Amino acid sequence: MKTNTRSSIRDALYEAPGPKTKRVINIATVLSLAALAFFLYLIVRRFYETGQLASRYWSIFLRGTTWKFMGKGLLGTLEVAVVAGAVTFCAGFCLMVLRISGSRIARGISIAIIEFTRGVPTLLLIYFFFLVVPSFGIKLPPFWKVCLPVSISASGIVAEVLRSGVNAVPKGQKEAAMCLGMQPANVFLKVVFPQAFRFVIPALISEMVIVVKDTTFAYVVNYPDLMQNAKVLISNYDALLAVYFVVGIIYIIINWLLNKLSVAVGNRTNRLRVSSAGKES
């Protein structure tokens, strides 16, 4: 007789609901859906009464030039997100190395920077690079006025994610490598960090969702990303609802794909860890 050995954290923490609880859940779900449907009806009705659902606002998306213009903006958004993600990883790695180092001064500096980046809003950093940095004679292109603040804002979180991965590596791995005569730097780079990186890949991909959303502040520096091009379309066609609705759908699709990728990588990583543990046993 086969038993189902697959379980989730939810199954371990909570008991399966009984018949009465299931009925309550079903009733609450139906009532919530009804309330949500009524709320959406009120919104759509309000938009209809104000003329925001008129065809002239939505017909612009039947033109190829509109999608070409939005595609250029989307490409700008992805360029900033990819470069900011790479810079964030490098900065986060450096902060993580300082955080786990043996120097008390290095740890203090790292902690101060991490707490600063986690506490300061991204928009404030963008305004700093846009208004304050040029006053020192440093002229940055709009691309870097967006990329650097976004990277700085996310670097502290990435540093903590990487540190959690390093702490998750069994100490026996490091001790075994040291017994073989490896230098501490080589132990970290060739034994500890590769394993830690595999542990935190899903969390790093999820962090990209935040990076992508932070790129929407590019309008502050007039960088031609998706949101900036959307503002141009709104000013030309006065189609605020239609344009922001389509742009919102695009962002939802991008973030949904990143989340699905994170889940898929996480499941694959867990399977590899389980199979490796089975071979060792």
Image (cartoon, rainbow, N blue to C red):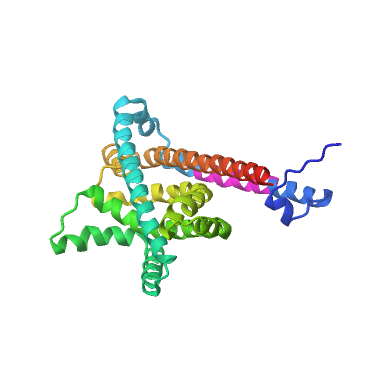
Residue stretch in magenta:
30-43
The quadrant of the picture occupied by the N terminus is: top right
Q: Residue at x 37, y 39 (%)?
A: 243
Q: Position of residue 135 (x, y in %)?
A: 15, 63
Q: Indicate left or right for 237 with 118 as reference.
A: left
Q: Position of residue 236 (x, y in %)?
A: 26, 38
109 lies above or below 85: below
Q: Residue at x 20, y 63 (%)?
A: 132
Location of residue 54 by image quarter: top left
Q: Residue at x 38, y 70 (%)?
A: 112
Q: Indicate left or right for 138 with 170 as reference.
A: left
Residue at the extreme right: 1
Q: Position of residue 66 (x, y in %)?
A: 31, 30
| 86 and 73: which is toward the camera | 86
83 lies above or below 126: above
| 206 and 3: which is toward the camera | 3
Determine the main secondary structure of the stretch shown in magenta: helix
Q: Residue at x 31, y 41 (%)?
A: 79
**Does the magenta-highlighted stretch encompass residue 221?**
no
Give the tally of numbered discs.
0
Q: Indicate left or right for 219 with 29 as reference.
A: left
Can residue 226 be seen? no
Can residue 80 be seen? yes
| 32 and 51: which is toward the camera | 32
277 lies above or below 111: above
| 215 and 276: which is toward the camera | 276
Q: Position of residue 278 (x, y in %)?
A: 68, 44
